[in-house]
Image (tube, rainbow, N blue to C red):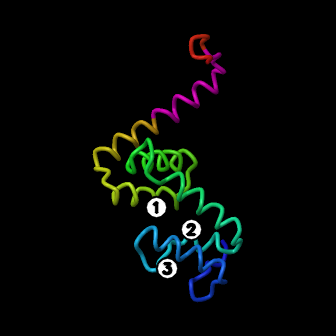
Amino acid sequence: MVKLVEYDDASPEVRAVYEDIARTRGIDPRDVNNAWKAQAIHPKNMARFWERAKTIMAPGALDHVTKELIYLAVSISQQCEYCIASHTHQARKKGASEAQLAEMFAIVGLAVEGNRMASAYRIPVDPMFDE
């Protein structure tokens, strides 16, 4: 466990990232979540990760809910408790219904089971799938 860096204790470099996160999310910079406060122990990596997150999660070919559901699905498969909680919250906040979440959870479970079986059986890829 790392020591979380609160806004009032943060360096100017970290504060700048907190303030950008706050502007982007419409929150007070003192209310950035713990993921950022933990990453603040290495300001350059935190800033790099924030820029990537801001770019990738911005409006694009996929809508906001779909992006959150994908992030959540990966978080579930990677068993990241923090990310599961955070991105479930974000998916709901961006409009995901309980039915959408339940269906996505079922798909993740199916995919994990199928992936494990395919790996265990060492199934060769069908030529028609090998693009």
Type of amino acid under label 1: Ser
Q: Which callout, 2 or 3, points at the residue further toward the start of the chain?
A: 3
User: For the residue marked with disc 2, what is the amino acid?
Assistant: Ala
Residue at numbered disc 2: 35
Q: Nearer the viewer, mark 2 or mark 3?
A: 3
Instruction: Say which quadrant the C terminus sits in.
Output: top right
Mark number, residue 29: 3
Instruction: Say if the magenta span includes residue 60.
Output: no
128 and 111: which one is in front?
A: 128
Q: Say if mark 3 contacts mark 1, CB within 8 Å.
A: no
Quick check: 25 left or right of 47?
A: left
Kindly give the residue lying farthest to the top in the view shown.
Answer: 127
Is disc 1 placed on a helix, strand or loop? helix
88 relative to 24, above or below: above
Q: Position of residue 31 (x, y in %)?
A: 47, 78
Q: Amino acid at mark 3?
A: Pro
Within 10 Å of disc 1 (Cα), the crowding (few <14, some 14-19, many 20+) is: some
Residue occupying image coordinates x 38% and y 54%: 91
Of the pair 108 and 33, the residue shown nearer to us: 33
Give the residue at mark 1. 86
Query: What stretch of residues is rendered in magenta?
Result: 110-125
Q: Is residue 115 magenta?
A: yes
Residue 60 in picture, x, y percent from top left:
45, 46
In the image: residue 101, left or right of residue 41: left
Relative depth, front residue between 94 and 126: 94
The x and y percentages for residue 122 are 66, 21
**Which quarter of the figure is the N terminus placed in?**
bottom right
Image location (x, y in percent) of residue 12: 65, 83
State the separation of the CA atoms marked 2 and 3: 13 Å
